[in-house]
Image: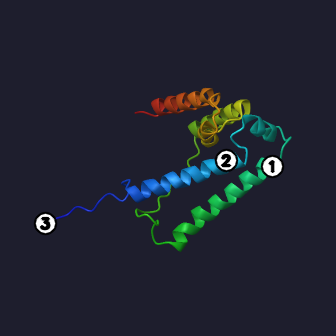
Amino acid sequence: MNEHPSNPHTLTLPKALITLLAGALFGFGLSLATMVQPEVVISFLRFQDWGLMLVMGGAAGLAMLAYQGFPRWFARPLLGGQFLTQPAKWDRQTVIGSAIFGIGWGLSGVCPGPAIAALGTGNTDILWALGGIVLGGLAHGLSRQD
């Protein structure tokens, strides 16, 4: 009997549980760091509150360590599959999208990850920002279709 190898990117129960746990931990961290409060983020962006600089600096450092270290330390990801790389692509679309994201973040104090975590804190006003994020993603997807 010829068995086909399973897709290494298939979501299994252990992967789903680990993903759920990682997401909950991430959301808890964002909430603890007060990044789910738009007024705190706006005061950071206005250089009035430097507490989030430590949070963002720590996150950037850990991400750099993970992206550089994990492929060196492990032959493959702990839950199977392979490490994927996506080279950075700087083009007109990237610059325009970055500017739109930055303007939206500056005006609203809301970033996608913290916005979703803010729903867990009961902040339903954040739905307006999430609606804008969804519409922006949809517009981008429609503009990239061939």
Q: Which residue is mark 1?
A: 51
Discs 1, 3 touching: Cβ within 8 Å = no
Q: Which residue is mark 2?
A: 30
Mark 3 residue type = Met
Residue 53 percent location from the top left of the image = 78, 50
3 or 2: mark nearer the eye: 2
- Residue at horizontal 41 percent and vertical 64 percent from the top: 80
Residue that extends furthest to the left in the rendered view of this protein = 1
Residue 13 percent location from the top left of the image = 39, 56
Mark 1 residue type = Gly
Query: How far is disc 2 from disc 1 in space, using C-alphas?
Result: 13 Å
Mark 1: which secondary structure? helix
Mark 2: which secondary structure? helix
Residue 140 percent location from the top left of the image = 51, 32
Query: How far is disc 1 from disc 3 in space, using C-alphas?
Result: 60 Å
Alpha-carbon neighbours of circle 3 within 10 Å: few (<14), some, or many (≥20)? few
Q: Identify the image quadrant of residue 48.
A: top right
Nearer the N terminus, badge 3 or badge 2? 3
Mark 2 residue type = Leu
Q: Which residue is mark 3?
A: 1
Discs 3, 2 touching: Cβ within 8 Å = no
Nearer the N terminus, badge 1 or badge 3? 3
Nearest the eye: 141 or 31: 31
- Position of residue 59 in the picture relative to residue 133 (left or right): right
Alpha-carbon neighbours of circle 2 within 10 Å: few (<14), some, or many (≥20)? some
Residue 87 percent location from the top left of the image = 53, 54
112, above or below 61, in the image: above
